Image: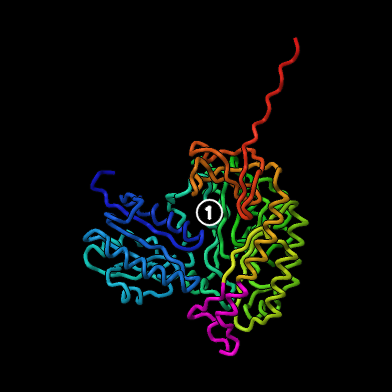
Amino acid sequence: MTDTSPTVYVETYGCQMNVSDSELMLGNLAAHGYVAVDHPDGADVILVNTCAIREHAETRVIGRLGELRRNMKPGAIVGVTGCMAQRLGPQLLEKAKHVSVVIGPDGYRALPALIDGARRGERAIATTFDLEEHYEDFTPRRFDKVKAWIPVQRGCDYKCTYCIVPTTRGPERSRKLLDVVRETEAVVAEGMSEVVLLGQTVNSYDDGEFDFADLLRAVGRVDGVRRIRFTSPYPNDFTDRVIAAMGEVDAVCEHVHLPMQSGSSRVLKRMLRRYNREGFIESVAKLRAGIPGLSLTTDVIVGFPGETDEDFEETLDVVREVGFAEAFTFKFSPRAGTPATRMPAELTVSDEVASERLARLVDTIRTIARAANMRELGRRYEVLVEKEARRGGDLVQARTRDFKTVLIPGDAALIGRYLNVELTGTTGSTFTGQIVRERQPLPMAG
């Protein structure tokens, strides 16, 4: 590259799939002579990779586009990519006149050509679904040097009534198992030993020949892989074959993020989830029987249309019964175009009630997690050091196989290393720890 190479800045919002897509976009642009930069000021191309899962996310992006306009260099090209681009399409060009390119998740192959067109004054939209597109010939430019996000599936066939993802990412389709293995081998060659397999309903993976159990076993056989994670699975897609593979493949970590959404069968039915309360609890029991020491985290929505006080109490009951280590909790956010927005107005739960329920839910989860974490103090775990801690103070952030976050003394030289630590304290969600140094054997008496 020369000093005259064009520069590109990508800002990412939303889920791990969006992070992976940003890595693909940067890889594609790098192959066309672009140089990635860490700040938008002075960049020749600014791409905002967006999320559409909640209204707040879109509002935030519109505001951010205004900020970028005030500070960008003259002649810079601004593009909006991802789920919000797919959902709004031409509306984005109307709302933000300085945006030249709008590209959905299946359009990143055209990105260099569309940027070239934008330099000639052309504004373009690429939001057509391509059910064959997996970007197999792209070389991602990875942000993380410790673990690799590897998409194994794109799109979603499950029509949950609150969810915009089928609209923004299209129908479900899986990559070929051998392509996933090839990418895994490539990231190991780059020095990474943890992979995270990504899909909207990742454990429904099916490439026409192999299922998710086959995929776990194949990735686990790659020499150099020490940890395998995956997100996000669907509760009743955990077949006996998949659970057996999870228990038998040494690299598969003892953690599952298992989205529950509600503990009420009535609410789950209105959500069009494919399980009821009892089915979810049964899935938890099967997972814990198959994977000793399994830690579970989850997603929960409160205030879904028609949720009664009794429904909410049922959610709290399941939260207490399962004992989640952590949960991402949300108030229902209606998304235009989803069936939930067409439910009768009398089913609407007021923001005041939803807020009170959310506060109670958060308090319940934190109380359970805090008590469980206190019982962990003094125990020893293997951790992988991921990055420097945000709070600074010569601390690094590491993670156990079962997804505990542990802050330990150290600096950037420890990033990427596996260490044994003893848990010494907890804030309720994060642990502090000390490195355990194995004693050297004493010399034999002469």
Q: Residues within 10 Å of mark 1 (few under 14, many from 20)?
A: many
- In this orientation, does residue 211 appear? no
Residue 320 horizontal/vertical position (percent): 73, 65
Quadrant in which the N terminus appears: top left
Q: Position of residue 60 (x, y in %)?
A: 41, 68
Q: Residue at x 53, y 70 (%)?
A: 171
Name the residue: 52% across, 53% down.
Answer: 149
Q: Please tell me whether residue 348 belongs to the stretch shown in magenta.
A: yes
Drawn side of residue 231 relative to residue 379, left or right = left
Residue 177 belongs to magenta span: no
**Camera-nearest residue between 419 and 92:** 419
Number of marks drawn:
1
Position in image of residue 379 (x %, y %): 71, 43
Residue at coordinates 60% horizontally, 47% vertically from top-left?
406
On-image quarter of the C terminus: top right
The location of residue 271, given as percent across then percent down, is 62, 78
Residue at numbered disc 1 = 150
Let me know if residue 384 appears in the view: yes
Q: Secondary structure at mark 1?
A: strand
**Residue 305 falls in image quadrant:** bottom right
Residues drawn in magenta: 331-358
